Image (cartoon, rainbow, N blue to C red):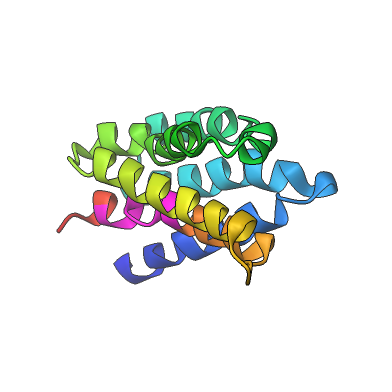
Amino acid sequence: MADWIFTLPFLAGLLWAVGGREGGRYFRRIGVGLAVSTYSYIYTGNYVSFICIFTFWIATSIGYGKLIAKRNWLVLFIIGIFYGLASAPVSAITGSPLLWVQGLVAATVFTGLTYWSNTWKYRLHWALAEGFTGIAATILIPRMIIGP
């Protein structure tokens, strides 16, 4: 049963990328949190996991377009930390110490890919940056749930 939980980051990446379009923003805002909550609930049976719907909604609702234009990479890094910390209910349920690592991974990937998408001569397509940010924001959740 434990193998399919490793699909969660890829589903989150897909929802994150689809949610980057104006008409699909709720795929990211509610879809990622719903996916994390559902996977977590199936594995833990703990209703607290449904708080992830709200934590991911809040984290993904933070606007950062003007910050990119201003090249404010520190604030973008902090927003990336919030993406990773949105999985706090999962960490609380499982007692996993990986929450802060999850935050740093999400922040590093989000900031790095945003920088690459907006400053280099050969820019990364923004949909790829969004998809990989979704993967990075949830990559350690399966490890939090099933343990080492």
Give the quarter of the figure containing the N terminus: bottom left
Q: Residue at x 26, y 38 (%)?
A: 100
Q: x, y percentage for residue 94?
A: 23, 40
Front-most of residues 124 and 25: 124
Q: Residue at x 36, y 32 (%)?
A: 89
Front-most of residues 41 and 119: 119
Q: Is residue 39 visible?
A: no
Q: x, y percentage for residue 92?
A: 27, 31
Outermost residue, left side: 148
Q: Residue at x 67, y 39 (%)?
A: 69
Q: Is residue 73 visible?
A: yes
26 over 125 or under it: above or below = above
Q: Based on the displayed image, in which of its 4 quarters is residue 58 positioned?
A: top right
Q: x, y percentage for residue 75?
A: 48, 31
Give the quarter of the figure containing the C terminus: bottom left
Q: Based on the displayed image, in which of its 4 quarters is residue 44 positioned?
A: top left
**Magenta span contains residue 138:** yes
**Magenta span contains residue 132:** no
131 over 66 or under it: above or below = below
Main SS, magenta residues: helix
Q: x, y percentage for residue 85?
A: 38, 35
Q: Residue at x 72, y 41 (%)?
A: 26
- Specify the segment rendered in magenta: 136-143
Outermost residue, right side: 23
Front-most of residues 29 and 92: 29
99 over 4 or under it: above or below = above
Is 99 on the left or on the right of 108, as rendered? left
Q: How many marks?
A: 0
